[in-house]
Amino acid sequence: MLALTVVLATGSAQGATPEGSSDIAVRVDIQGEVVRVEVELAVAATPQEVWDVITDFEHLPQFISNITSSKIIFREGNVVRVSQTGKTSVGPFAFDFQSVRELTLTPIEKFESRMLSGNMKRFRGTTQIEAAEEKTRIRYKSEAVPDTALPISLGRSMIESETREHYQEIRKEVLRRKRAAGNPPLTQ
């Protein structure tokens, strides 16, 4: 989903874990040029509330900090193509990114994503959601081949940090919308 896929190529070194994200499990495996990312977290919301945020492609720039534009350029049934641009930085260096991804949606359950074009050699990912004890569990897995080379240790820490921040921003937006709708968050 989203800029996370492009962040694998450009990353943002954040250093500290963002507040409230210590329960976001992120695993990064780098083997040669292939980067695999797995994420798991729970959100005190219903699956529908989570789904509405993670598939709100047109509004991603409003709550994902490194996305500057996100537009649906094609939709037919459960297949959506999304064009995104953004900017992230590593120390004094700033990187622009862009991608066009095709997503196959299985409503309120999962979506599968593959990159059609952009500044990665290859990307595939799956985001799944499921109800779990008055919360919704999000599981994300991706495999990518970045277009740029990063030192493994630096690349891993940047990807972990940016990924954790990305999912914290998603969780904050889900809970913000839930409160705005007058629904108190489920047990956190």
Image (spheres, rainbow, N blue to C red):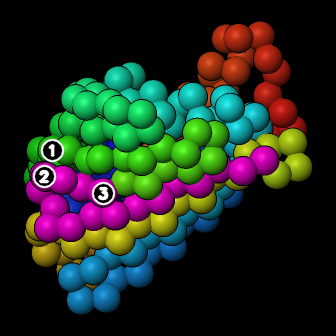
Residue 98's tag is: 1
Report which quarter residue 120 is drawn in: bottom left
Label 2 SS: strand
* Image coordinates for residue 14, horizontal then vertical, percent: 37, 54
Please check the rendered image and state whether residue 121 is part of the magenta-colored stretch, yes or no. yes
Amino acid type shown at disc 1: Gln
Q: Earlier in the sequence, mark 1 or mark 3?
A: 1
Give the residue at the far front of this rendering: 77
Q: What residue type is labelled 3?
A: Arg
Quick one: label 2, few (<14), some, or many (20+) residues within 10 Å?
Answer: some
Residue 50: where, in percent of width, then height?
63, 35
Q: Left or right of 170: which side holds 75?
A: left
Callout 2 touching callout 1 (CB < 8 Å):
yes
Q: Quadrant of residue 149?
A: bottom left
Between circles 1 and 3, the one closer to the viewer is 3
The question of residue 34 being in magenta is answered with no
Disc 1 to disc 3, how far (Cα)? 14 Å
The secondary structure that dominates the magenta segment is strand
- Pick the front one: 74 or 143: 74
- Please tell me which residue is depicted at 13% across the width and 52% down the height of the picture: 117
Q: Label 2 sits on what residue type?
A: Gly
Q: Mark 2 points at which residue?
A: 118
The image shows residue 19 at horizontal and vertical percentages of: 59, 45
Which stretch did the figure color magenta? 114-131
Determine whether label 3 and label 2 are within 8 Å by CB.
no
